[in-house]
Amino acid sequence: MVNFIQLNICKKEMLLGQRNNQETQKWTHTQDEILLHNHLNFINSFKIRDDKFYFVLKNEDKYLSVVDFSNFANDSCKFEFYLNQFLVIAEISRVLEKILIDYVFKILKIPVLGLEVFNDNSQVINLNKKYNFSEIKRKVASKKEVQCVELKNENR
């Protein structure tokens, strides 16, 4: 895992391109294209913030995914991740979600992990069911219905 703050400008631009890719963007709360200067300002804000952490997951020279951890409160946190749309690796979503779940529970020692997923993202919903995430509520974001789910360490 590489912290966004440690990335050079070329890598930051590459990740912005992946984030603005329509296949990624359609599953994010912010549906608009993000401009480079806004992206760089956002990353620079992590130098003084402790409420969000963004990382790139990579294997050797291949960037696999972006992951962020946020909303640290009451022994819980939320996470999101999106895959590099230009890589095709069988079962990568399942493997990465398992790694991230283990990271939160074993390394960060946070007992409750939450995430939000658009109701029409059946692939992620089915993946979350495999790991025993429970739906706790629904809401609307970006004019779409969102499932808020959580996984408690003891329910794994």
Image (spheres, rainbow, N blue to C red):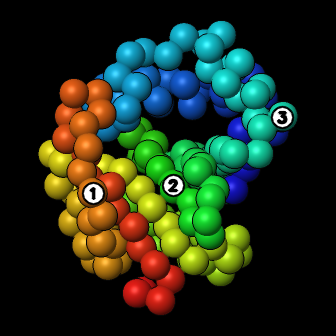
Q: Residues within 10 Å of mark 3 (few under 14, many from 20)?
A: few
Query: Which quadrant of the structure image shows residue 32?
Result: top left
Query: What number is the disc on residue 137?
Result: 1
Provide residue 118's location: percent of width, then percent of height.
25, 45
Residue 67: give its label: none
Label 2: which secondary element: strand
The residue positioned 70% from the left and 71% from the top of the image is 108
Residue 89 spot, x, y in % from top left: 38, 58
What is the crowding at mark 2: few (fewer than 14 residues within 10 Å), some, or many (at least 20)?
Answer: many
Nearest-to-viewer mark from 3 and 1: 1
Amino acid type at image mark 3: Lys
Q: Earlier in the sequence, mark 1 or mark 2?
A: 2
* Label number found at residue 47: 3
- Whether residue 105 sits left or right of residue 96 in the image: it is right
Res. 59 in view = no
Residue contact between numbered discs 1 and 2, judged by CB atoms under 8 Å: no
Instruction: Name above or below for residue 103 compared with residue 77.
Output: below
Disc sitting over residue 79 in the figure? 2
**Quadrant, the N terminus:** bottom right
